Image: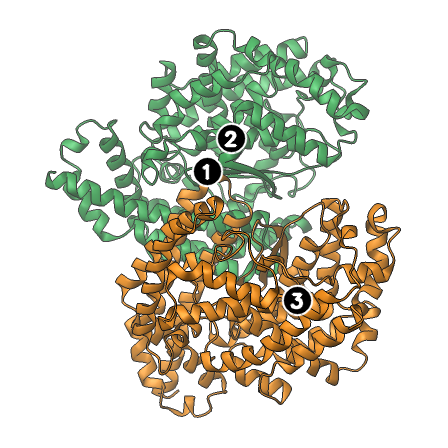
Chain colours: A green, B orange
């Protein structure tokens, strides 16, 4: 074994240790969100702070920097897409970022956002933006400092975006979003003007929680989420978490008076879970067993939730089962009425309740505002006014207050700036991947109608999941689809589907 | 602040860190036993090994030894029952024990028992003692070495016993058990000869699991287990675990065809849980917030399970509720028949299924055998013969094979030697504490019959729980009851209760 190979081996061992410690923190976090009794909150905060602090310490150990120097210009990195090339590239990227930001700034951001989240909860409840304003101002200031430490070529925003979507640039997003937005706004307005509307009240009938559980679980199993390596639990804010190879857990929440929340939520988290379960266990603890980016992760959840789960073939299989499961509420409902109802599109104020068409406009609005904050082109005090102006322009409706306007999301109070675009990138990746899958897999619709989802899952395993972080998102899209990221796939998908539904 | 006070403060901080890390391991262990999908087992073993390894490293840090030297002969230890006196005494005790055993021996015991447990499972299934024999021989040899490193004055067994019941001696146990045993054997034989027998088949009717859950939970709440600082879950091998102040969890298992398992199991674990919930949170991370010993812990579970939960006043309150909850199975059952059935006493082969009278004989048998092993008076190859001979003498029945004889327990294969006596010590402590509580609290039976268990709980909180490890077990018994540990309390309790039931 050469010296470089020895150093590489040691580098991976050190990295794996940090991942192991963080995975312990993951278990405690999952438990906190699903099981922990109220009384445990205070000690749990200490436990989690200790574990993630230790993981951070291990991941920023100076020894990692030394080992990286030994390996970074060796044969091991000759091919950046080889196992060693990709692992070294990604560890170096993570390591360098984490040592660039001074510990004091990390701690100040942590303190500030902890306080800001509490204030945000109250300010939103009271619909009092001025209460939240000074906290957001401080956060934006600190995030600019963070970007300065991280460094960037063109935009401070690039540095933050890189935390969630490594390698993606503000410029690239701007170009894609701008083309996408105009077409979307036109589609949203056309749908709003269409006389044909679904009767969504059928989804608000009684759907008993115990049967929703069985039905959601059945669907998660059908699409390929593996319960021998996972579980489905209840959480107030649903999420998916990979606690180690062989243990990826999903969560959902149940509303007895709405069919959609748990069912599509489970498909969504199930899609995230299938991605995590498809990462190569033999590389666990290294970047080769990690998800590419938040956007690619979101592409997997959106594909199963929307392209598959809100598609006609899926319901050819599942609608008779839904009628059997909920005879009181769906026994008298026609297939087309149900299918139209679950695909209702209408402008609304709250992002997390938005349909798959308008959702992207919610994201673009936030992206433009975040970018203006980071460029210093927008002051926090002007946020409500700018939000409402843009909102009216995109959606044709105006928020009645800031609680359902600029204060609806937890992200900014938590210091998550640069995160929002990954949701829409997820939609774009999903559409482009799915278009490719339809070309490569014959009779996908027929398979779904017969309740067979295994070929799509296998395709995703092979094309995307098994690579871990071998490719960055942009490269992965090219490798899988033969083309650069383009919003035309999403636009074609939306126009075709909703054109038919709304007779446009 | 004096130098000693500074050293004491630092000592506690270091100790608390070890406790914090171990508490993280506790969460992962709880999750493993209740929730973890099968696929997660391998990684979970790595996570838990890392966390408990780190906790051990922190608890055996040489710095702790130095700090102990600074404080151990200071004003802080002048009163061994003061906060600082007790904390220093117990930290010193733990620390010195853990540094005495060489790391290689610890690791060899760990490796040996990991293998032995797998072999034990198979050997028990195949009823093949000779398969297990060489592994048990090695374990006994290693445990003797461990005892030699730990050091002892009279008996090697003392050193092992101290791991579970600090300060207790083999001699003291021998004296108590010998007096207790003869009287117990007489009582067991008298009960066996009594013509009056309960009809236990009423407990084997259908008790639907969902209603068992509600009923067990109701009882746990009634006796004072606090669900805002705990939970009740399902585990194959029920246990209680304190994950931190404000988070103590209990588990049980349900058998739809037996009333006892879940119900009395929940009272038992609930008793453990009430103890943990009663430890002083303000001292968390120090011995003052830890349980005295396994025996004292067991006294709390046994008291709620047996003295309270298998008592007539308890069922005056709960029997009408049990009939309402399980009308198909208990609607036609008379109070006295039910009460007699849950107090059935009969010699049986399996310890964990034994009633409160014969249980102690199971323990004494194991204690005598362990002691003979450690003294070198018994060879492992002779275990089956000796077991069966003693068993016949104590119980009047002979095991048909080693699976229901000397291979029934997991303890020895896990390296737990010196642990068994704590179960019976628990019974003895419980009886002595309970006799005192009955003297000090007026109308305890009337309170129970009215569904009020709060005064007993408060008494236990004040007399036992709030002290943590301030007193060793023997001292605590004297402080609480005014007398040394004596088996007469248990014997009086058993003779009175079962004399009435069986018309002796």
How far apart are the alpha carbons under marks 3 and 2?
44 Å
Residue on which disc 2 sits: A226
Residue B265 in view (yes/no)? yes
Q: Are marks 1 and 2 on the same chain?
A: no
In this orientation, which residue lies closer to the viewer: A284 or B486?
B486
Secondary-structure class at tag 3? loop
Q: Are marks 3 and 2 on the same chain?
A: no
How far apart are the alpha carbons under marks 3 and 1?
39 Å
Disc number placed over residue A474 in the picture, else none: none
**Mark in front: 3 vs 2:** 3
Which of the 4 image quarters holds residue A470?
top left
| A432 to A62, vertically: above or below | above
Which of the 4 image quarters holds residue B445?
bottom right
Tell me where residue B496 appears, x and y as whole percent: 75, 76
For the residues bearing labels 3 and 2, Cβ distance under 8 angstroms: no
At horizontal 65% and vertical 13% (from top left) the residue drawn is A316
Chain-order first, disc 3 or disc 1: 1
**Mark in front: 1 vs 2:** 1
For the residues bearing labels 1 and 2, Cβ distance under 8 angstroms: yes
Residue on which disc 1 sits: B39
Residue on which disc 3 sits: B356
Tell me where residue B202 appears, x and y as whole percent: 79, 51
Residue A241 in view (yes/no)? no
In this orientation, which residue lies closer to the viewer: A247 or B110?
B110
Tell me where residue A482 appears, x and y as whole percent: 35, 13
Secondary-structure class at tag 2? loop
At horizontal 71% and vertical 20% (from top left) the residue drawn is A341
| B286 to B336, vertically: above or below | below
Q: Is residue A67 left or right of residue A460?
A: left
């Amino acid at each position: 074994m050469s010296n470089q190979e020895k150093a590489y081996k040691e580098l991976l061992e050190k990295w794996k240790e940090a991942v192991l410690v963080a995975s312990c923190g993951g278990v405690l976090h999952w438990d906190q969100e699903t099981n922990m009794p109220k009384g445990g909150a205070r000690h749990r905060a200490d436990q989690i702070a200790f574990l993630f602090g230790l993981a951070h310490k291990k991941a920023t150990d100076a020894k990692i920097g030394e080992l990286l120097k030994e390996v970074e210009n060796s044969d091991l990195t000759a091919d950046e897409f080889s196992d060693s090339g990709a692992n070294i590239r990604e560890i170096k990227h993570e390591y360098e970022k984490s040592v660039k930001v001074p510990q004091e700034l990390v701690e100040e951001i942590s303190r500030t956002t902890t306080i800001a989240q509490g204030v945000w909860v109250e300010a939103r409840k009271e619909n009092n933006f001025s209460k939240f304003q000074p906290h957001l101002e401080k956060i934006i200031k600190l995030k600019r400092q963070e970007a300065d430490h991280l460094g960037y070529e063109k935009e401070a925003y690039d540095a933050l975006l890189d935390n969630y979507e490594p390698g993606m640039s503000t410029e690239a997003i701007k170009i894609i979003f701008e083309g996408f937005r105009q077409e979307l706004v036109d589609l949203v307005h056309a749908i709003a003007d269409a006389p044909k509307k679904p009767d969504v009240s059928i989804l608000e009938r009684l759907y008993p929680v115990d049967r929703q559980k069985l039905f959601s679980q059945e669907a998660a199993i059908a699409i390929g989420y593996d319960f021998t390596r996972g579980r489905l639990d209840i959480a107030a804010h649903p999420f998916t978490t990979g606690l180690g190879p062989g243990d990826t857990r999903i969560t959902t929440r149940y509303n007895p008076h709405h069919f959609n929340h748990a069912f599509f939520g489970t498909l969504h988290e199930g899609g995230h879970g299938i991605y995590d379960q498809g990462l190569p266990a033999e590389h666990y603890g290294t970047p080769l067993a990690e998800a590419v980016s938040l956007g690619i992760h979101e592409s997997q959840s959106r594909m199963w939730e929307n392209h598959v789960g809100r598609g006609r073939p899926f319901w050819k299989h599942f609608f008779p089962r839904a009628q059997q499961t909920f005879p009181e509420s769906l026994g008298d409902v026609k297939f087309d009425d149900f299918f139209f109802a679950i695909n209702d599109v209408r402008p609304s104020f709250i992002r997390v309740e938005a349909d798959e068409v308008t959702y992207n406009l919610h994201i673009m609005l936030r992206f433009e505002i975040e970018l203006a904050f980071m460029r210093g082109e927008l002051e926090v005090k002007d946020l409500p006014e700018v939000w409402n102006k843009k909102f009216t322009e995109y959606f044709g409706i105006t928020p009645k207050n800031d609680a359902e306007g600029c204060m609806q999301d937890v992200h900014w109070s938590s210091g998550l700036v640069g995160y929002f675009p990954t949701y829409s990138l997820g939609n774009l990746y999903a559409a482009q991947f799915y278009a490719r899958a339809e070309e490569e897999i014959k009779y996908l619709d027929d398979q779904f109608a017969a309740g067979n989802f295994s070929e799509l899952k296998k395709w995703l395993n092979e094309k995307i999941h098994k690579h871990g972080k071998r490719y960055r998102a942009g490269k992965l899209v090219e490798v899988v689809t033969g083309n650069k990221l383009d919003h035309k796939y999403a636009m074609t998908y939306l126009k075709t589907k909703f054109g038919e539904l709304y007779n446009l």
